[in-house]
Image: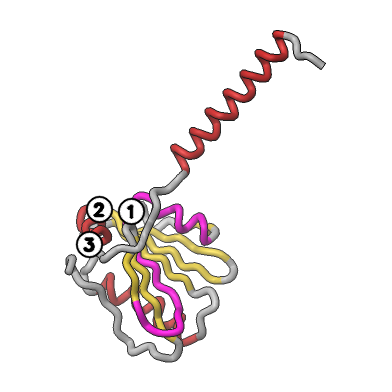
């Protein structure tokens, strides 16, 4: 079955629109890759940004870890490590995530974990979550702090500057 000229034009228009739609999706919604790093890129972003995020992931954590996860963020913020910046906090558990910001009257909203990660696509953030042992890891756009099982010592901090 041969296509008429009009059908060919319509098919071409549909394919062109689909290609434009895919390109627009990639352009507007794709995030820059966030590879592990030595911390210098993260600290540069943290120093130069007017906004910083804290993502508290208590999914699968035990009671002691949950306390440590939240306290770790409080410790970092209260020590002035992000002074002068808009601080956005997102807490996630098995039921979803709750967002609160220091900007605009502490508005809140509910989202998924994936939406929470996308929320920080243009700002540095610190992900604090449970792990087998206490540790940390740097990425280009964020830092991960792991609170070990049963090992919470009541203190958490980051360096105020790179190095």
Quadrant in which the C terminus is drawn: bottom left
Which residue position holds label 2?
49
Q: What SS does tag 1 mark?
A: loop
- The answer for how far apart the CA atoms under marks 3 and 1 are is 15 Å
- Residue 74 location, x and y as percent? 32, 74
Q: Nearer the viewer, residue 138 or 145?
A: 138
On screen, 152 above or below 159?
A: below
Q: In the image, is residue 119 part of the stretch drawn in magenta?
A: yes
Colouring method of the image: secondary structure
Query: Picture coordinates of residue 47 (x, y %)?
Result: 20, 58
Disc 3: which residue: 40
Give residue 146's quadrant in the image.
Answer: bottom left
Callout 2: 10 Å neighbours few (<14), some, many (20+)? some
Above or below, 153 relative to 85: below
Q: Nearer the viewer, mark 3 or mark 2?
A: 3
Determine whether the residue tagged by mark 2 lies in a helix, strand or loop. Answer: loop
Q: Residues within 10 Å of mark 1 (few under 14, many from 20)?
A: some
Check residue 12 for magenta coloring.
Answer: no
Residue to which mark 1 is pinned: 123
| Residue that appears at 42% across and 48% down | 31
**To which quarter of the image does residue 156 belong?**
bottom left
Provide the secondary structure element on which disc 3 rests: helix
Q: Residue at 69% x, 14% y: name it.
A: 8
Query: Which comes before the other along the chain, label 3 or label 1?
Result: 3
Upstream in sequence: badge 2 or badge 1: 2
Q: In this rendering, is residue 3 above or below 124? A: above
Task: Give the number of the mark in front: 3 or 1.
Answer: 3
- The answer to whether mark 3 and mark 2 are in CB contact below 8 A is no
What residue lies at 35% left-to-right and 49% top-to-bottom?
122
Circle 3 crowding by C-alpha within 10 Å: few under 14, some 14–19, many from 20: some
Q: Are marks 2 and 1 in contact (CB under 8 Å)?
A: yes
Residue farthest to the front, as pictured? 1
């Amino acid at each position: 079955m041969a296509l008429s000229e009009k059908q060919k034009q319509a098919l071409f228009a549909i394919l062109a629109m689909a290609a434009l739609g895919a390109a627009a999706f990639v352009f507007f919604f794709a995030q820059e890759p966030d590879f592990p790093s030595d911390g210098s890129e993260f600290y540069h972003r943290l120093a130069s940004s007017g906004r910083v995020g804290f993502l508290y992931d208590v999914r699968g954590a035990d009671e002691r870890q949950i306390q440590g996860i939240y306290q770790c963020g409080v410790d970092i913020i209260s020590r002035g490590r992000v002074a002068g910046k808009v601080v956005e906090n997102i807490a996630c558990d098995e039921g979803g995530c709750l967002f609160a910001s220091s900007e605009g009257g502490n508005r809140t909203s509910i989202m998924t974990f994936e939406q929470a990660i996308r929320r920080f696509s243009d700002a540095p953030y610190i992900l604090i979550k449970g792990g087998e042992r206490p540790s940390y890891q740097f990425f280009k756009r964020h830092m991960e702090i792991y609170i070990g099982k049963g090992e919470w010592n009541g203190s958490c901090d980051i360096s105020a500057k790179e190095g």
